Image (cartoon, grey):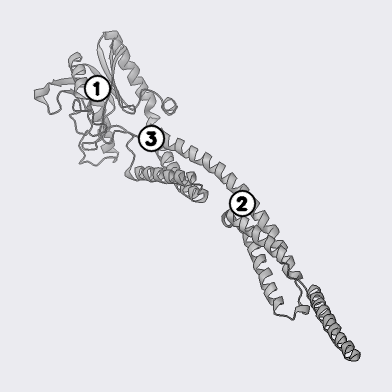
């Protein structure tokens, strides 16, 4: 009986030892087996996530792509090692790739943050500059007869600029930058074209200034009324005895820049003229009208010169019937070459002037520097 009991205890003890030792051996074997670098891989994954959140694919593209490639290499290496027998696995390459990926991901995230901030600052300055350019186009060239192509570029440029501002307000800086760059190309080219045209036009300023001075002096010496039409500012200024008495807005021919050359060119002439006929309301379709002595001798001489030099065809006609008349106030240049005022203002001028009153029409009474200030 004792022998049997002793034998049973040996069996129980053996089982207990076996149950204790085997788990310990298993644990030891697991501990001794190579462990995958889960922490390093997670570090790389989080770094890539932060980089992506900072839009590194756009602002730090090279570093971000390198980080992604290194992360993919770590995953491929991990998968390859997992196919081996557990004790033959070596995760050193996985660790190396993951750490390098994490470092480059962090660099990409930081570079992207800095680049985004810098772009935001530059973009704000760019939009402000373009708004200033757009304002100058509106200020200096609203009534200037630019070509339809140039007007189209200005319109399209302003639309793109507004789209850029909307994208900027939403934090979409790359899209905003794209739109502002397109707007910059259109608006800058249009402004350069328009400015060059204006500079060319203002080469005649010394002549205009002389005409203006002579007209004001004549008014002063003869104690009479005289009229000066400033085409660029769209003003009609009435002087008496050399002193400005009235100033009114006017509308001109559709193609008012430059002197009138031929019939039908829709240009308002430039030169020194006189009123030769007054037409009351029942004598003209324009409420009241003052007929000028266009073309004068100077206009005819210039016309003959252009015919002789081939600048105009022999069939060209000089035209005439240039008036200061009513029916203005439309807000656009619409005449065939005449000068239009609102009826109430035309009534004032009609009352005070007489046949023989000097009328001088110039491109501008001030030089280009004063115009552009």
Mark 2 = which residue? 112
Residue drawn at 67 percent across, 55 percent down = 106
- Pick the quarter of the image with the C terminus: top left
Depth check, front residue: 103 or 25: 25
The span from disc 1 to disc 2 (Cα, nearest Å) is 68 Å
Dot 2 falls on a residue whose secondary structure is helix
Does residue 271 appear left or right of residue 369 in this picture?
left
Mark 1 = which residue? 273
Which percent across, then down, holds residue 360?
Answer: 28, 21
Closer to us: mark 3 or mark 2?
Answer: 2
Residue drawn at 29 percent across, 27 percent down = 270
Mark 3 = which residue? 138
Q: Earlier in the sequence, mark 1 or mark 2?
A: 2
Outermost residue toward the left in this view? 282
Q: In which quarter of the image is residue 1?
A: bottom right
Which percent across, then down, holds residue 40?
Answer: 72, 63
Depth check, front residue: 229 or 29: 29
Does residue 127 appear left or right of residue 61 in this picture?
left
Does residue 225 appear anywhere in the picture?
yes
Which percent across, then down, holds residue 88?
Answer: 78, 79
User: In this picture, is 50 found above or below 237?
Assistant: below
Closer to us: mark 1 or mark 2?
Answer: 2
Dot 1 falls on a residue whose secondary structure is strand
Q: Quadrant of residue 89?
A: bottom right
User: In this picture, is 63 found above or below 301?
Assistant: below
């Amino acid at each position: 009986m004792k022998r049997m009991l002793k034998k049973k205890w040996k069996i129980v003890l053996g089982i207990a030892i076996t149950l204790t030792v085997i788990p310990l051996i298993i644990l030891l074997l697991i501990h001794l087996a190579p462990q995958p670098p889960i922490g390093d891989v997670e570090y790389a994954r989080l770094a890539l996530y932060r980089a992506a959140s900072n839009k590194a694919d756009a602002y730090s593209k090279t570093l971000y792509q390198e980080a992604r490639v290194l992360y993919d290499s770590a995953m491929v290496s991990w998968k390859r090692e997992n196919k081996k027998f557990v004790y033959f696995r070596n995760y050193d390459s996985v660790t190396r790739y993951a750490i390098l990926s994490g470092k480059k991901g962090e660099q990409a995230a930081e570079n992207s943050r800095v680049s985004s901030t810098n772009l935001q600052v530059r973009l704000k300055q760019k939009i402000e500059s373009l708004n200033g350019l757009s304002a100058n186009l509106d200020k200096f060239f609203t009534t200037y007869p630019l070509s339809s192509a140039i007007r189209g570029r200005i319109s399209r440029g302003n639309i793109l600029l507004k789209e850029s501002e909307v994208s900027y307000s939403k934090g979409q800086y790359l899209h905003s930058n794209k739109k502002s760059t397109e707007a910059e190309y259109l608006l800058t080219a249009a402004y350069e074209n328009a400015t060059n045209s204006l500079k060319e036009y203002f080469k005649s300023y010394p002549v205009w200034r002389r005409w203006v001075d002579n007209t004001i002096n004549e008014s002063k010496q003869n104690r009479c009324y005289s009229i000066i039409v400033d085409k660029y500012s769209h003003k009609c200024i009435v002087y008496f005895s050399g002193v400005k008495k009235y100033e009114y807005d006017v509308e001109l021919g559709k193609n008012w820049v430059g002197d009138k050359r031929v019939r039908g060119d829709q240009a308002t002439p430039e030169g020194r003229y006189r009123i030769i006929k007054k037409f009351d309301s029942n004598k003209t379709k324009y409420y009241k009208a003052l007929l000028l002595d266009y073309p004068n001798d100077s206009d005819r001489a210039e016309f003959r010169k252009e015919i002789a030099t081939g600048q105009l065809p022999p069939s060209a006609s000089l035209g005439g019937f240039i008036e200061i008349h009513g029916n203005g106030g439309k807000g656009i240049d619409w005449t065939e070459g005449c000068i239009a005022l609102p009826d109430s203002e035309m009534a004032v001028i009609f009352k005070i002037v007489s046949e023989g009153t000097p009328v001088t029409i110039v491109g501008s009474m001030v030089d280009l520097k004063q115009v552009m200030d």
